[in-house]
């Protein structure tokens, strides 16, 4: 372990206590000056550490600085195969992933940023990504998949996020078809999957799965503040949740032809059995969401009695509010 890792591990165990430079230097067999330099580097990386003369250093327990040491520490062996890249800021981790792939990145990787200045969502929307408040990350898988299996990746990613949250908190998030995760009727996570594919063979060269999770409260912009939510679990650090999602993703992407995760997708669906509107080719259709098929398609019974399976993530669906169903008046727009 490097001095930095040693110090971090030590500080974690002795957070909120003053520890003298002398004690640290003796513990790790280095000079006080080396300790001072390493602590300064940790501070530059964003760790909240105070230094008081005659008392020493105090590491604050609420530190939630993105750290590859910590993420690897929480991961299972399988997920540790991922190359981790942590950035303080970037335009978009999906863009970063594309650039790195174009420049020769060949390992399966996870690119994480503390902030995105131009985070992207589906349908050309933006994804609000302020610093320190959320998880903004993109998995890069170099894999040849049929385009259909590549589409399943998005469905699998939504299940991975929900499983990771359920295993690490007492929250019960839900999935809104096709790939949004909601908590208490507010969107806390969006997923944007992009693939570099070969249309002649119908297979992908690599696939980029961008996941954004709102972890802590922030000033959401006006256009989303009525529907955006946060996970808000103080005890759960971003590092731990990133590792948990990566673990789930590694399990799910091991065999994308095995669609057994669809059972969890159904279990956590917020729309099965609900009245919905959707727009297809600019025509409004109304019906009841009946089920999710094995490929993640949404089976809808239209009001004219016909059954339609929606497969395109480009379709915008809107859950009808209870009051609307009763009175056909006001609307709750969850999109
Ligand atoms: C959506 O809600 O429409 C999808 C949002 C996807 C956001 C994530 S954050 C990490 C990755 N980088 C991006 O620019 N977008 C995705």
Image (cartoon, rainbow, N blue to C red):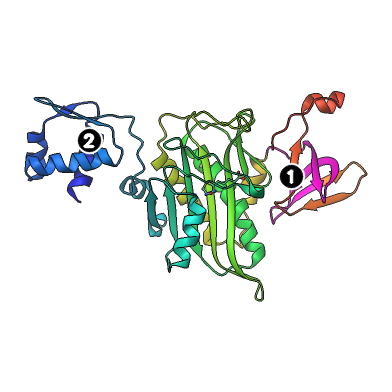
Camera-nearest label, 2 or 1: 1
- The residue lying toward the viewer, choosing from 331 and 76, is 331
Q: Is residue 153 visible?
A: yes
Residue at 74% of width from left, 29% of height from top? Answer: 332
Q: Which residue is mark 1?
A: 316
What is the magenta segment's predominant secondary structure?
strand
Instruction: Give, as a single range, the part of the protein colored magenta.
Output: 270-299
Task: Where is residue 112? Give x, y as percent.
Answer: 43, 49
Specify whether tag 2 is near ligand 1 (CB below 8 Å).
no
Q: Residue drawn at (78%, 28%), measured in percent from left and top?
A: 331
Residue 21: within the magenta? Answer: no
Left or right for 143, reference 286 = left
Q: How many marks?
A: 2
Q: Residue furthest bottom?
A: 200
Quadrant position of residue 162? top right
Q: Residues within 10 Å of mark 2 (few under 14, many from 20)?
A: many
From the viewer's perspective, tell me whether residue 301 is left or right of residue 236.
right
Q: Residue furthest right?
A: 304
At mark 1, the secondary structure is: strand
Tell whether 177 sits left or right of 81.
right
Residue 263 visible, this orientation: no
Specify the quadrant that holds the C terminus.
top right
Residue that carries the numbered disc 2 in the rendered image: 11
How far apart, in angstroms, are the residues tagged by discs 2 and 1? 48 Å
Secondary structure state at the residue bearing disc 2: helix
Residue 221 in picture, x, y percent from top left: 57, 31
């Amino acid at each position: 372990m490097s001095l930095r890792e040693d110090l971090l591990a030590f500080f974690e165990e002795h957070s909120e206590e003053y520890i003298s430079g002398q004690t640290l230097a003796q513990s790790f067999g280095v000079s006080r000056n080396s300790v001072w330099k390493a602590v300064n580097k940790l501070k530059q990386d964003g760790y909240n550490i105070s230094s008081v003369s005659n008392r020493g250093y105090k590491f604050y327990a609420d530190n939630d600085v993105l750290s590859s040491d910590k993420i690897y520490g929480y991961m299972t062996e399988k997920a540790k195969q991922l190359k981790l890249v942590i950035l303080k800021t970037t335009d978009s981790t999906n863009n970063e992933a594309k650039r790195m792939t174009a420049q020769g990145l060949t390992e399966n990787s996870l690119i994480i940023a503390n902030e995105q200045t131009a985070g992207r969502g589906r349908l050309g929307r933006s994804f609000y990504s302020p610093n320190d408040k959320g998880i903004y990350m993109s998995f890069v898988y170099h894999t040849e998949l049929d385009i259909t299996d590549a589409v399943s990746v998005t469905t699998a990613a939504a299940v991975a996020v929900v499983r990771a949250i359920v295993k690490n908190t007492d929250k019960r998030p839900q999935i809104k078809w096709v790939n949004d995760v909601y908590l208490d009727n507010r969107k806390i996570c969006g997923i944007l999957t992009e693939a570099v594919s070969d249309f002649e063979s119908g297979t992908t060269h690599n696939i980029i799965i961008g996941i954004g999770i709102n972890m802590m409260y922030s000033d959401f912009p006006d256009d989303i503040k009525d529907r955006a939510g946060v996970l808000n679990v103080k005890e759960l650090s971003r590092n731990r949740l990133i590792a948990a999602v990566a673990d789930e993703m590694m399990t799910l992407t091991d065999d994308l032809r095995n669609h057994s995760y669809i059972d969890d997708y159904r279990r956590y669906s917020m729309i099965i059995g609900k009245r919905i509107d959707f727009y297809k080719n600019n025509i409004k259709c109304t019906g009841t969401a009946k089920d999710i098929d094995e490929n993640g398609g949404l089976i809808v019974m239209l009001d004219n009695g016909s059954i339609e399976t929606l497969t395109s993530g480009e379709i915008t669906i809107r859950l009808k509010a209870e009051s609307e169903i009763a009175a056909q008046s006001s609307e709750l727009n969850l999109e």
